[in-house]
Amino acid sequence: MRIVGELINASRKKIREEIREKNYDAIAKVALDQHENGADFIDVNAGIFVGKETDYMKWLIQTVQENVDAPCCIDTPDPAVIEEAVKVHKGIPMINSISLEKGRYENIIPVIKGTDFKIIALCMSDEGMPYTKEERLKIADRLVNNLVKNGIKLENIFVDPLVQPIGSGDHLGREFLDSVEAIHAKYEGIHTICGLSNISFGIPKRGFANRAFMVMAITRGLDSAIMNPLDNKMMANVLAAEMLLGKDQFCEKYMNAYREGKLDF
Ligand code: THG
């Protein structure tokens, strides 16, 4: 599982203030903690700072990369922010995200064309949220074909089928899971990713639902997730699920986590 650490997101109250004050040590610590607990990418999102998003985004990327040897996942729908952010990013960034929404798709393409950037292709369009597997696949198809036409390799594309709260419809968990499986069946070598905790929005004891859903998604092929790597129960579930599916040779990762005390709680 490729893990994108989600904690540096201005929609979180505490982080919002730390970003606003450009509290270098606080942001550096959140980046470091996530990396030490298994994050392969550090998500950075300054979306609530209207008019100042570019400035904060650049500062976040520099702060993260001065402290952690990991790429960022540049989390903004605004192509202008992405364009400036990639200029200060060292190494290969992940772009979160491109979608079929007007103004978003055509303006991001020139920034990413022919690069080795990792691209999250979010299954969203101007026709509203996709509910069924068929709606998601239609959007994914257009996004993937266009990205490939613009020189993006399939192995650099991460399709996000969009997790929707189970409280909005009993079938929404299943539609998402079916989508993950169908996307892997259709495009060999592609990746899938999601913000998994959306599933439990509005229900109590969210952790139970999040962990169960993660294990289900892994069995259907989900290979990347935007999540909280400091959630040790979730991390243990990921390790166990991947081991049981034969994705952890000689149970090495699971055993190492055990020896490091990461399964003690
Ligand atoms: N897909 C893609 N990108 C995404 C999402 C997605 N980026 C944003 C989001 N969804 C994933 N990131 C987060 C970051 C933080 C939190 C949840 C998702 C979070 N939530 C608190 C909680 O769950 O308890 C509530 C917020 C708070 O702390 O105030 O921390 O789906 N491509």
Image (spheres, rainbow, N blue to C red):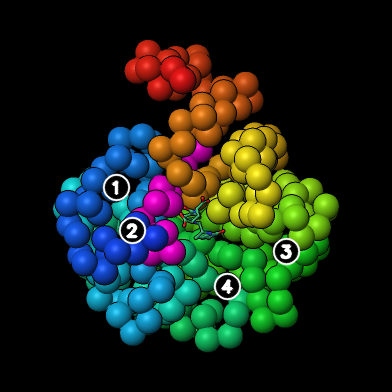
Q: Amino acid at mark 2?
A: Ile
The mark nearer the N terminus, 4 or 2, is 2
Pointer 4 residue = 99
Any part of residue 211 in sight: yes
- Disc 3 and disc 1: Cα gap in Å? 33 Å
Binning the other alpha carbons within 10 Å of mark 2 as few (below 14), some (14 to 19) or many (20 upward) gives: some
Q: Are marks 3 and 1 in contact (CB under 8 Å)?
A: no
Q: Are marks 1 and 2 in contact (CB under 8 Å)?
A: yes
The mark nearer the N terminus, 3 or 4, is 4
The mark nearer the N terminus, 3 or 1, is 1
Pointer 1 residue = 30
Q: Where's residue 135, x and y in %?
A: 77, 67
Which tag is nearer the camera, tag 1 or tag 2?
Answer: 2
Pointer 3 residue = 136
Q: Amino acid at mark 1?
A: Val
Q: Magenta span covers which residues?
A: 1-12
Residue 15 — which label? 2
- Disc 3 and disc 4: Cα gap in Å? 11 Å
Magenta stretch encompasses residue 190: no
Which residue is depicted at the point 64% across and 60% down?
162
Residue 69, image quadrant: top left
The mark nearer the N terminus, 4 or 1, is 1
- Disc 1 and disc 2: Cα gap in Å? 9 Å
The mark nearer the N terminus, 1 or 2, is 2
Question: 265 or 173: nearer the eye?
Answer: 265
SS for dot 4: loop
